[in-house]
Image (cartoon, rainbow, N blue to C red):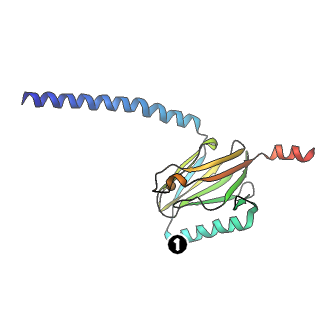
Amino acid sequence: MNGQTEKKGLNYKLLAITLILAAGIVIPLISYVKSHSPDFKVSKEKITKADLIGYKEKVDAMVADYTVRQQDGLPIVHPPVGSDIYLLAKNYDWGKYTLELEKGAMYRLHLATLDMKHAIVVRELKLMNRIKVGEFKIIEFIPGVSGEFYMLCGEFCGQGHASMVGKIIVVDPVAADAVKAL
Ligand SMILES: [Cu+2]
């Protein structure tokens, strides 16, 4: 009996230590992420299966209207500055096109998933957001740096998770104008 009580006491201590250590890691991590994330305004809305069909049509229309060239067999889509842009995640891609955006411009980035929970992660652009079935998100997104960046999935979604890689290109309109002026 005595031994058992001792054991229990020890477990509580271990639990308390684990919690304190976990808090010591998690809390600084959260504040680090917060301090390094720009304040993109995110809103969340419910989406039904029927809405998803309309959503898919918007994706297709955007690709049809704003494809400017092809690269590696994928259309490069350059939507107008300030417009609504759409991404539909599914196992295991972000739509078979590459978005080309302008640095410093604001876009309303719509995010939905066709099949299960995914998370968009473009580290260099500080873009990180989870997307669940039955909801969609609108992110007022401003690409802050120019370059070519991988769009990864931050939520384990099965066998092909690691291959769920898209790309975002951010061009600098000021630099492009300077080259034209030469
Ligand atoms: Cu995924």
Vertical arrangement, residue 137 with respect to residue 32, above or below: below
Total labels drawn: 1
- Residue 173 in sight in this render: yes
Depth check, front residue: 158 or 151: 158
Residue appearing at x 69%, y 65% in the figure: 63
Vertical arrangement, residue 10 with respect to residue 113, above or below: above
Of the 4 image quadrants, the one containing the N terminus is top left
Residue appearing at x 68%, y 68% in the figure: 61
Depth check, front residue: 22 or 93: 93
- For residue 110, what is the image quadrant? bottom right
Specify few, some or many for label 1: CA neighbours under 10 Å numbering under 14, 14-19, or 20 or more. few
Which residue appears farthest toward the right when viewing the image? 182
Residue beneath disc 1: 50
Left or right of residue 161: residue 149: right
Q: Amino acid at mark 1?
A: Ala
Residue appearing at x 70%, y 41% in the figure: 145
Q: Position of residue 72 (x, y in %)?
A: 70, 58
Of the 4 image quadrants, the one containing the C terminus is top right
Left or right of residue 113: residue 8: left
Ligand 1 within 8 Å of disc 1? The answer is no
- Give the SS element for disc 1: helix
Q: Position of residue 23 (x, y in %)?
A: 39, 32
Q: Position of residue 120 (x, y in %)?
A: 55, 51
Depth check, front residue: 133 or 155: 155
Residue appearing at x 48%, y 63% in the figure: 115
Q: Position of residue 124 (x, y in %)?
A: 63, 41
Which residue appears farthest toward the left when viewing the image? 1
- Residue 142 in sight in this render: no
